[in-house]
Image: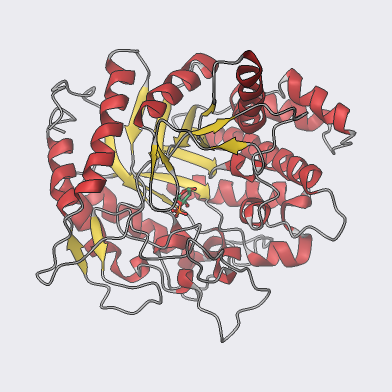
Amino acid sequence: MAEDKREFPADFLWGGAVAAHQIEGAYQEGGKGLAITDLFTLGDKDHPRKITETIEASEYYPEHVASDFYHRYPEDIKLLAEMGFKCFRTSISWPRIFPQGDELEPNEAGLKFYDDVFDECLKYGIEPIVTLSHFELPLHLVQEYGGWRDRRLIEFFARFAEVCFKRYHNKVKYWMTFNEINNQTNFEVSGHLYTNSGIVPEAGEDREKLMYQAAHYELVASAQAVQIGHQIDPEMQVGAMIAMCPIYPLTAKPEDILFAQRAMQTRYWFADVHANGFYPRWMKHFFAKKGFDLDITAADLKQLQAGTVDYIGFSYYMSFATKYQGQADFNENRDLVDNPYVKTTEWGWQIDPVGLRYALNWFTDRYHLPLFIVENGMGAYDQLTEDHQVHDDYRIKYMQDHIIQMKRAVLDDGVKLLGYTPWGCIDLVAHGTGEMSKRYGFIYVDSDDHGHGTFDRYRKDSFFWYKNVIASNGAEL
Ligand code: BG6
């Protein structure tokens, strides 16, 4: 048992997070179009997911069924209410609202579904927190426009944002534009460029340049969305969503420190643009050095300035470490090294609770904005006992350790933290591998990696533990 009995501020938003494509299923219901994630096959920790061009009968696509939240959301939200959730983060599947992505009129059945989900939350006093784009790009936008390589996607995204803001602004205050926009810095790893931006590089194309161009369009689209949101409702809070894995120098050798600084600049310039409204000096220099003649117009730069975010939402699962070995620039795929001071999960993710406090302070010093931890957690294989229990003490330990550091950041360091929504509060499809068996939840979903099972829900030990954390406002961990 942790000993720090202090409570969090009274308005602290305790909750949990999911994403539409990983939990809803019903991939062809309610007029929904295909999302790019509907073409991701099942993988595992040793075999990456494939992305097929069409749906192939010989493959299994976990997102098609996922956790069946589309049909079971009243039961799920009731369980969240039982835990005492103050908020619930999910995303709006873009192709449920605009099945192709480029239509002028939205799909009413899709809009109605999210009305129903949000109303169900509000019935229990649970505040919905919404991400507009959590990797659910309409497939048609890839096939017709090449994904975010095309400037026209800015207009399509702005329309999607406007429709959602107008429809739900009375139900949703906190929004985020693009989930983990910066994860595409790992552009060399198959899948990342596609997941974030729907881009299939052609032979010989410079993937790095493509990534920077797509990210620029996304940042402009995000800035437009912020402005649209504020015009519709000045109370609306529109945030960024950054994947935060602090990159430490492996040693105190000055060259390692300098290189780790460069690594942080390379991975977090997205947040600089979101929060400051302009490109950092180093990035402009980098583009010039690389000879990247990106399509960045004067009008774009004005948009970025006018649409800075209200807060920084971020995911935190792990930290990284790096070491200087003569490299000219940081390359995430090449330059990460193991940190001997931390353990890892079964999927090799470095477990580092102190890094969360570091991240909270780093963001605060750099942007002076409120923060929101919108993902955190530990994927693990859980065992369901015959009497339907799950003894997930490893998950409880992971979260205790992280919440303690979060508490210190808030109460000892003065960080302004809006809330905490641990990832996958209801078991869902893992994004990286497609496994259902890589579980994060407080609520067990009885389904295996191939969608076999009853889909019944069971409360894990962590369910009762987290309920008490919320009830005591973080005093009892
Ligand atoms: C984040 C994503 O990268 O990490 C989620 O925003 C994802 O969509 C989560 O599920 C955990 O990763 P994984 O691969 O274990 O699901």
Q: Is residue 86 visible?
A: no
Residue 379: x %, y % from top left: 36, 52
Q: Is residue 4 visible?
A: yes
The picture quadrant where one finds residue 472 is top left
State the count of labels.
0
Residue in the picture at 34% in, 13% down: 414
Quadrant where the C terminus is found in the figure: top left
Is 18 situated above or below 45? Answer: above
The picture quadrant where one finds residue 36 is bottom right
> Observer-nearest residue: 454 or 109?
454
> Observer-nearest residue: 461 or 443?
461
| Residue furthest out toward the left | 387
Left or right of 274? Residue 116 is left
Residue 104: x %, y % from top left: 66, 60
Is 409 situated above or below 183? Answer: above
Left or right of 171? Residue 29 is right
Is 70 situated above or below 57? Answer: above
Left or right of 1? Residue 373 is right
Quadrant where the N terminus is found in the figure: top left
Residue in the picture at 38% in, 23% down: 357
Residue in the picture at 49% in, 65% down: 108
Residue in the picture at 29% in, 54% down: 441
Residue 248: x %, y % from top left: 53, 26
> Observer-nearest residue: 243 or 392?
392
> Observer-nearest residue: 125 or 258?
258
Left or right of 130? Residue 153 is right
The picture quadrant where one finds residue 23 is bottom left
**Applied colour scheme:** secondary structure
Residue 152: x %, y % from top left: 77, 51
